[in-house]
Structures are given as structure tokens and as C-alpha cells.
Amino acid sequence: MNAGWAEALPWTIVLPMVGAVLTPAVAARRPRLAGTWAWGVLLVASALASGLVYQLATTGPFSYDVGGWAQPYGIELRFDHFSAWVLPLLLLFVVIVPFSWRYLDHVMPDERRPAFYALLLLNAGGMIGFCVTGDFFNLFVFTEVVSLSSYALVAVGGRGLAAFAALKYLFIGAVSSLLMLFATAQLFALTGSLNMADVAGRLADVGGGPAVMVAFAAYAVSFMVKTAMFPVHVWLPDAHAIAPSPVSAVLSGMVVKIGIIGMLRVYQVFFAADVLELGAFNQTLVWFGAISIVMGAFFAIFQDDIKLMLAYSTISNIGYIVLGLGLASPYAVIGASVHVFNHALIKATLFLAAGAIIHQTGLRTLSDLRGIARRMPQTSAAMAVGAVSIVGLPPTAGFVCKWYIALGAFESGQAPFGFALVFGALFIFIYYVRMLNAFYFQEPVHDVVIEANEAPWSMRAPVIVLATLCLVLGVLGGIPLSFVEPAVLELLPFWGN
Amino acid sequence: MDVVDARPILAPFVSFLCAGLVFAVGRSIFWRRFFTFLAAFIKMGLVLSMLPGTLRGVVYVYDFVEFTPGIGIAFRADAYGMFFALVSSTLWLFTTIYAIGYMQGDRDRVRFFGFFALCVSTTVGVAFAENLLTFFLFYETLTICTYPLVVHAETPEALRAGRIYLTYTLIGGGFALVGAVMVNAVAGTLTLSQPGILSGDLGTPTLAIIFTCLTIGFGVKAGIMPLHGWLPIAMVAPTPVSALLHAVAVVKVGAFGVTRVIYNVFGVELLGVLGFTVPLAFLAAFTIVASSTIALTQDHLKRRLAYSTISQLSYIVLGAALLTPLAATAAIIHVANQAFAKITMFFVVGAIARTTGKKHVSEIDGIAARMPISMAAFTIAALSFVGVPLTAGFITKWYLALGALEADAWWFVLVLIVSALLNAGYFFPIVHRAYFRPAKEPWPTLEEGRRFETAKTLLFPIVICAAYVLLLGVTAEVPGMPFSIAQVAVESFFAGGGVVP
């Protein structure tokens, strides 16, 4: 195998982790240095990830054996088309971190910054590891790295309900992790292996049966909790709304996606093994996806707090993705896989824009923020672009995915879900129209709003970059689509229907 | 003959760029006007430069991006698209002049002119859309871009109108999306370049669902009853917006969509077999008569015009639904005829409101003495709607009637006659009041040093558009005028069969 960039694979995980550990030391004298340090680490990691994606594009998926131990005995890191998600993920981090520099001024005292950035780096490292591991036990380990750092990041703001929200998140997250551990143990007991490719081969010998079914179900439920599907979404709104805005962007845009990536990984194994009849399971996913779309939109309508509303729309959008996966037709799965990225982008735009507004005014409800667009035109415009995007109206990034998922629904003969997808999305626009009306077309009621200034450039620039990308990807949406397409087509021969 | 050429994408892009520049440097009145006019002229030039080719049968195409094979954004300036683009880019120019006069001293003009340019950009994008995806992309973008214009006044009334507008159009957009995606799923293609892409083998239920979804989706903007509710309410927008968007761009995009569905998605032959257009034709006929009747009762000038618009749009839908070449020709020509006549009326009504503050039919007794040129223009437009020869409207009615007879739908000729009477019934009282009733109170006199009845920027577009109504009526068959372009379009629609006039 062509070594090339494959050698960089472990370093992409190790770098943020080591960076995290070193953060308190680097920033010991000057706590504000921590932000710059974290940014630097993430920049280098993204450079490595670009190399990995380049390698993937030229030679196809590749593996790295940790410590030189051959599979299935050693630990395998595998970089396939779904792992390529690490590049956009890191790039989003690179945009989000500069935003946090100034944002944290109001959130925490300087001396807590090193801890914050250490957690953020740990979170990023955990997600990278999760995406590239080829081994079920490490999948669990990285899930825990991500989850634990997320709990802490929610609480890090340290104000009022933050601890409570983090605790709620922790309890539900711990149950989900336990289920995952159980499933991993079950698989190990059945097959005597933890390497994904190896397990797939051995499962075929084990055959079907209730034991395999239980392992699969445990994985599925565990990942559903992690993605915050309705009705196991209860932990998400508070945690995402209370966390500092850059953290909300990370949690809402990326951390919930590990459930989706995990689902894809488990699918890859179980379909390769071809031991379970998963048609019924797909049907369940489709239903839960459709219900999540509608319920997320429904709850969002009643919120006055802009961040809570954004949090609920995450549930809706996760519904799209899960619906797309469950439809199990090529177009739908392509749309869903790309929406993993597009939603992260859109949600980061929205949370950062909302964060900038909250940072400048100290207000966070619609009724208080009336007329803010006059004082913060650029941030509000970004917010508007994000709002149009998240509803999936053209010409934005959200639209392309919606088209593909709906196309998949009609293609696989499940037309009612196509309708649910299209009209469920409109439902959520009710709320966003209220938001845009309040921002743009209503008179300010607060002096703070009348005197507010546009956010500093370190916050404005990331927001503008992200909003521009939302628009650009609406028109050039083909780039991620064409990238995911081969992976999905490779997966689908094994896809139950 | 297809020729690859960037002009079909440049035409919408010019006004898109203009919108960006207006947002960026629009605080300066000079630059705002400069860029708006520059873009309007360039766009018109681009569209006009394609006209000779179109008349020769050349179709300019440009593939922009492809997402996955067969799904992407592409542009194609066929005869029908050219026709529509020509109308909207011409009227953009005149409306811009008018808007500059009308919006003088109004609030938020940067936002106004920026979104105005975006709307025109998307309208031309719709005109040049090669496939349903591109069509839908611009169709929905248009919805979003008109919203800030509708709620421009920011009063509770305007916000309510905006809400209703969005509810109607976004739900309609949802149906259009479902329909378009279904076409993609069953036909495997989205192109609008063929006379029909669906095959009859798909079974009537599937085809019926697709047809219903697409007609509802585009019918909302075309104001087909009972989907018209947003249109009279949206009249709360400033008059240039009502003029260009609610008499021309937005509503015509809907009518354009319905025609595209009939001629390019389903095709004449298939619909002839399926018969889906029969109920649509009845609905359109009902709309023509019903909304004209409602218009009789409206005292507010703009609302009366709005109901008249609803009625006139259904001429286009009906013409298309009759599935005969002559009716199709009438439908296409009416896109231009209605646009110029209706925009003249809106301009006049707006000029009256700006000059005298009067907005109701009952308040304009004797206005012709005060604003003779404007009222003359209004009269010409009114005659056109009634269908008096030498005006544009006559051409439409003549071919519609021929087309109806060709389709053995004599009942439609009756509808035409009733509609003409109703049109006379709600437009002539306005003319009568303006000319023959004495003014209730003396009209405010001219300011010192002004030679015209109202601002020049308001009067100039009125005169040009009224002149155009006559020109379209007199020179209908001259090459380069609408008729010749419409014929090229109709030839392509009926390529599979039927008689070409």
C-alpha cells in the first residue's frame, strides 16, 4: 500500500489530544494564550486532515496499524469516505475557535481559559478518533472522550442552570454509553473480536439470532440518544442553549453527529455480515426521523429564547438525516450523509451569529432583541442566511440535501415521507419568520439594542465566512455530494430494504 | 439548435451583482442609481443580443454545475424563456425609473433597491431555467426576496400581509418541490428542453399527483382561485413593488411555471390523453369571471387592480390548458400584453397616490383635468383589457377565441365575452369618473416651476408603457415583436404534433 499520508493518520488524533494536555502548561503565565495555542494546534491538525483526504481521493480508503501490529490483533485506524468528515469538522473548529476568543470575556474569568481550550481540543481529538477508528472498543473509548468533554463544556459557563443542564446531559449520556459498552461486549462474546472488518466476517459464521439482534439494538438505541432523536432528545435543548455559543455550535453541529457516524459504522459491519433482516429497523428509523422533524419544529415554535429555538431545530435536522438513512435508497443516503456536514455548517453559522448578538447586547429573547438588525446588520444578515438555510430553502446548503433526501423517498416508493420532509421543514420556518421580523421589521424596545454595536471582527469574520459558505454550498453543493457518492454506493449493496 | 453561450447565466447574474453592490455602497444615492441603471441596461442588452438568434431558432444553453449526473443547475434561453426575460428586463428598467421617483425620501431605500434587483435576477433565472431544479431554485428565492419588499412599510398591516404572503407561497413552494422531486424520481430527468419528459406508462394516479402538486405549487403565484388570497393583501407594498412584482414578475413566474408544466414536463400529447387540463381550464375560467366580479366591488384602486390581475393571469393559464397552438400563442403573448397594460395602470395609480394622496375609486372624480397624460395612459390600458382592437389586449383575445374554437370549447368564447364586459364594468367607471365627473374639491395645484402633472420620473415610464400597449397591438406580427417569438416557442411545444399557426 502506498504509505504517503497514511502515516499522518494517528498524528491527526494524537495532536489535538497532546495539545489538550499541554494547554494548561503553555498558558500557565498568560491564560489568554490558550486560545491561540488551541487554534494553532487545530490548524496543524486540519493540514494533516487535508493530506488524509487527498490520499483518500487519490488511492481510496486506507488503514494504519497502530504499533505495527497486524489486524485483527492490533488496533486498526481506517480512513474511508465517511471518515473524510474529519476535515470539515476540523475546519469548522478552526473557524469557531477565533470566535470564542472574545466571546469568553463575558463567560468566564481568564484563568479558566486553559481548561476550556483543553476540553475543546480533547473534544475535537475524540471526534477525529471516533471517525477513523476501525475497532469497536476504541469506538466506545472515543465516544466517552467526546461525551465527557462535552458534559464539562456545557458546565464550563458555570452560571445558574449550566450545572443542572450538564448533569442531565451526563445522566442520559451515561446510559447511552453503557448501552454501547454492553453492545461491544456482546459482540466480543459472540465473535471473539473487536476489529470491525473482522467482526463482520465472523458474524457471518455466527449467523443471526437474538443475541446478535440485541447487540445491534443496543448500538442503535445508544446512537439514537447521542443524536438526540425524538423522544430521547430531552437532554439536548437545555445543554445546547445554556452552553457558551461556540460550544453550542460544536455540540449541535458536530457532537450529535457522532451518533450518525456511529450508526453508519455499525451498518457497515452488520450489512457486510448480512445476518440481520434490517428492513423493519430501517422503517423504524424512517418513522422516528419523520416524527423528529415535526416535533423539533413544533417545540421550536414556542421558544422565545433564540438559542433554545436553535437547539430544537437541531432535533428537526437530525430527523432529516435519520430519515434519509432509513429510506435506504442511494439518493436519500447521499443526501443524509452530506447533510451531516451541511447541517454542522448551518448550525455553526446560526449559533455563532446568535452568540455575537448575545455578546453585544446581553439579551437573548426575541421580544428583547427587536430591531437589532439596524445596529448589527452583518451579523443579522448571517443569521437570516442561516435561517433560510436551515429550513432548506434555496439557494442555500440546506436545500440540496433536502432535494436528495426527498428524491430518495419518492424513488423508494415512500412518498408520504417525502411530503413529511418538505412540509415539516416549512413548519419550522414559522419560528424563523418571527425571528427575522423581530430583527428586521420591528422597532427596538431596549436601549441596549438601540446602542448596540456590530461585533468585533474576531467574531464577525467567522460568522460571515460561515454564512457565505451556506450560500456557496447551495450552488456548488455538488462537491460534497460527489465525494460521498462512491462511499454510499459501496455501502448500499449490503443495505437492507 | 443548441449553442453554448454564457449569456443565459450572465443575464440573471448581472442584477444579482447589482444587488450586492447596492447593499455594499447603496447609501450613496448616486452609486445606488448608477449601479441599478447600469445593470438594467446591461441586462436588457444581453437579452436583446440573444433575440436575433432566438428568432432563427438558436437556443443558447449553459450548464453551470452538476451535483450528481442528471441533477444540476443549468440555463437555457429558449424562445419562451426569452420572451419572458425580455418582458421582465424591459419592465425592470422602467420600473426602476419609476421607483426612484416614487421612493424619494422613503425609508430603507438601500434594502428596497437591493431586494428589487434580486427579484429581477431571480425572475430572469426562472425564465432561463433549463430544468425543474433550477426553476425551483429561483422560484423559491424569488419568494424570499420579495418578502422584505412586501413588508417594506413595517407597519403591523404590512407584517400581516407579509405573513400571509409567505404562508401561501411557501406552502405552494412545498408542493412545487414535491412535484419536481417526484418528476425527478419517476422520469430520471428534470429537463425543460423537451416537449414533455413524462411517459404515460407511469399510470394515471402517479401522474395525477405530480400534475396536482406542480399546478398547486405554481398556481399559488399565478393566483388561480382558490389560491389567490395573498395577492390583494400584498398590495400593501409600495406601488413599484406592486407594479413589477404583483403584476409582472412574481405572478408571471407562477403562470410561466404552469405553462412549463403543461408544455415541457407533461407535453401536449400526454395531457391530451390524460385530460388533466380540463379541470384546470374550468378553474381558470371560473377565476376569470369570479375575480372580475369581485373587482367590481373594490373601491381601493390597487385592490381593484389586484383582482383584475388575478383574472388576467387565468387567461394565460386557460390559454395553456386548452392545448391548441393558437391558444398557446395567445397565452404566451398575454404574458407581455398583460404585463405592459397592468404596469401602466399601477404606475398611474401610484402617481395619483403620490401626487394627490387619493387611493380610492370614489375619490378621483375629475382627476383627468389635473393629470391628463396619466389618465390617457390609464384609458389606453383599460381599453386593452377590454380587448378593443389596436391595443395589445385585442390580439390576446382574438387568438384565445380562435384557440378555444380550435379545441371545440365554445363555452370559453362566452367566458371571454363575459370577461370583456366585466373588465369594462370595473375599468370604465374609473375612466368615467376621471373625465366626466366634476372634481369634488379643487385639486392641489402644481408647485412653482414644474411643467408636468407629476414628477418626471413617474410620468416617463407611464407614457412609455402605454405607448408599448399600443405598439404591441398594432405591430403584433412584425418580426422581433412578441408574436414572432411566441411562434418559435409554440413550434417547439407542438413539435410532437398539432397544427402550428
Image (cartoon, rainbow, N blue to C red):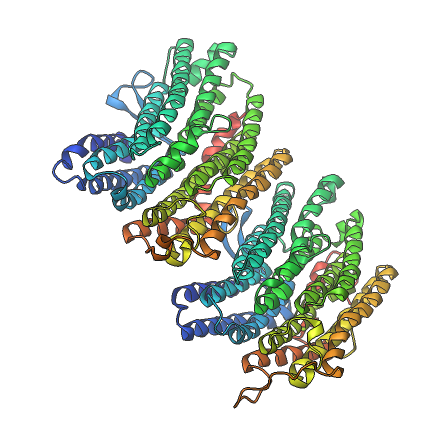
Outermost residue toward the left in this view: A29
| Residue A200 position (above or below residue B447) | above
Q: In this orientation, does residue A267 appear? A: yes
Residue B210: x %, y % from top left = 69, 44
Q: Is residue A445 above or below residue A275?
A: below
Name the image quarter holding the C terminus of chain B: bottom right
**Residue placed at 34% from the left, 17% from the top?**
A72
Q: Can the viewer see residue A6 in this picture?
A: no
Which one is in front, A178 or A493? Answer: A178
Residue A324 is left or right of residue B480, and the answer is left
Residue A139 in the image, given as x and y percentages of width and height: 36, 23
Residue A20 position by quadrant: top left
Taking B447 as reference, is A228 left or right? left
Image x and y of residue A453, in percent = 32, 56
Q: Write down the quadrant of residue B199 in the picture.
A: top right
Q: Nearer the viewer, residue B422 or A83?
A: B422
**Residue A225 x, y percent position in the rendering:** 44, 25
